[in-house]
Image (spheres, rainbow, N blue to C red):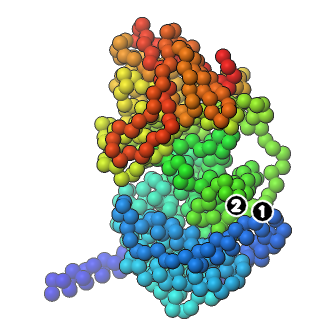
Amino acid sequence: MKNVIISTSRMVKSIMLLAMLLLTCSTWGQQNWLPNHPRLLFTGAETSEVKELIKNEPLAGELALYLKAEADSIAEAPQLPYEMDKYGNMLWTSRAYVYRLGTLSLAYRIYGEDKYLKAANDAILWVCNFPDWDPKHYLDTAEMTTAVAIAYDWLFAELPQATKQLVKANIYKNAIHRVLREYEKGGPGSWAKRETNWNVVCNTGMVLGALAVAEDYPQETGIILENAARYMPNCLKLFAPDGVCYEGPAYWGYTNRYLSMYLKAVTDNGGDKGGIAQLPGINRTALYQIRTLTPSGHPFYFGNAGIGHESFGGPAYFLYGKMFHQPEVSAWNRNEVAKALHGARMFDQLFFLSLPWFDDTPTGKTSTVPAMEVYHNKINDIVVFNGDRNKKGSIYLVAKGGLPNQAHQQMDCGTFIVESDGVLWTEDLGADDYDLPGFWDGKPGGQRWKYFRNNNFSHNVINIDHSLQYANGHAFVCEEHPEAKQPSVKLNLCEVYKEKAKSAYRKFTLLNNYTIEVEDEVNLLDAGSKVSWVAGTKANVEVNGNKAHFMRNGKHFYMQIIAPAGAMFKTYPAKNTYKGEKTIEGITMLEAECSFKETDGKVTIQMSSKKF
């Protein structure tokens, strides 16, 4: 009897919750989604236009042939089992099915061959017979929902009725039912409401799933649309004002892959009623991302960025190029697509959207890259310097502020990478293994900071008495002069080094097209402390007193210590300190250990493609 009372009570509460949500979502419940399928990401009305583009635009035609070859291969591939990886989740399985189902479904829409329909149907049946879509790690559920929603929507007219019934039941059971409860019960740290990439990815997956079956669950779809628009700004507010994703370039890619799908889906189905595209920084985020790549196209791998494991371009750039009238962004992405088709780049799991979202808008007059730009952000300010790119040997540098205790951050406040002649002269080692003990313990003194890649000893920063940066300290741009003859910017690092210094500032100055000066001004708590200037490189380095000569790929680069007098460079190999850290190969650390006569002092280093 007790169990009956409890069950009845829960049922009443569930009914009341749904009623309350429905009352608050009447406007969204009347969302004017497209009445017919396909309605997601590549609508039926767009099909003929894309087929025409394939005929007339050579790169789009080449992309279509690549799509067909991939679909041919995938159609013969075995299904992936329901099993968890070493992290206890199945995220890579979900991503594999986003790729598999998206590619097969698009190939069927473009080429109409039954083998693609059959292979997609088999994959849908397979994943819809999984016990669940791993709700304990909701990214897995969000991405699997995305995969199934796209295939269901794009193949709706041809799928067997039994498959469609199974899909509807699974999207409701695995996604809609769960997200309705999460919106009502989840706290600020919920996957639906937190301030990280999870928010955008999970909410987008739920929106795509709901819109795919909107005719069957119209009221629930309205609730999901309203709440996704309500909570996604919790993450996206941190892109303000200039488009920086503070979590780093890998998470920029992940967040914007899903944000772009959200924007396309809601725009086509009643409009962006939540005004997500109008949030500060969203219209600048693609420009930020490409402007902070080195001239050779190398990303600044700050934070937990997985080197070599994320693509460079992607369909989001085409969507943003069109949406925000930025042909520079689309032109850049066309170049990346061409590289990927010839094996010089890798596609992400949404590569298939590059075809229906393809943008061939001409760029017009090429704009000059500014000598200095600052992309402001509440957590990570980003600074970029450009020598004249028309001059051989021109220098490029990108640097950052930071707040180590935030999601996916490292003790890299003040770090930079520098490039000339297409060669990267300093490195950021990227992320370590997420499964290391205490990897997410980011408080001051936390286990996270014992790992070499995470702490400041691996980064291109100063260290005082070989001690850690303060994890709760914030480094930010406090002074900038972009229009000066010698543009400069100053970072306030006082909080980061507060345990060893009264104040600390790092200033970057573009002296000319080939030379940048880095000046660290420190007021020490103890005049006996030593300040070490450190940089990591893959180049061969010869040191001679206060000078260092870098050699790599037949090119040369130079550094010299201007101050303090008597300081000298030394080198040593970068090494891990704990078992289980990712292997480090071929990285040399360059260090200048400096002493001051007083508590006040400066460490000044000039870096140049020209020999001093």
Q: Earlier in the sequence, mark 1 or mark 2?
A: 1
Circle number at residue 112? none
Establish if 419 lies above or below 52.
above
Locate residue 608, reporting x and y percent.
65, 24
Q: What residue is shown at x 40% (from left), y 50% (from top)? A: 433
Query: Which residue appears farthest toward the left when viewing the image?
Result: 1
Cα–Cα span, label 1 and label 2: 9 Å
- Mark 2 burial class by Cα count in 10 Å: few <14, some 14-19, many 20+: some
Type of the residue with mark 2: Leu
Q: Quadrant of the N terminus?
A: bottom left
Which of the 4 quarters of the picture holds residue 467? top left
Locate residue 456, reporting x and y percent.
42, 33
Mark 1 in CB contact with mark 2 (< 8 angstroms): yes
Q: What residue is shown at x 82% (from left), y 55% (from top)? A: 362
Establish if 128 lies above or below 489.
below
- Left or right: 495 as drawn, with respect to 328: left
Q: What residue is shown at x 68% (from left), y 31% (from top)? A: 555
Helix, strand or loop at mark 2: helix
Helix, strand or loop at mark 1: helix
Locate residue 116, reporting x and y percent.
63, 81
Which of the 4 quarters of the picture holds residue 175? bottom left
Circle number at residue 59? 1
Locate residue 64, reporting x and y percent.
73, 70
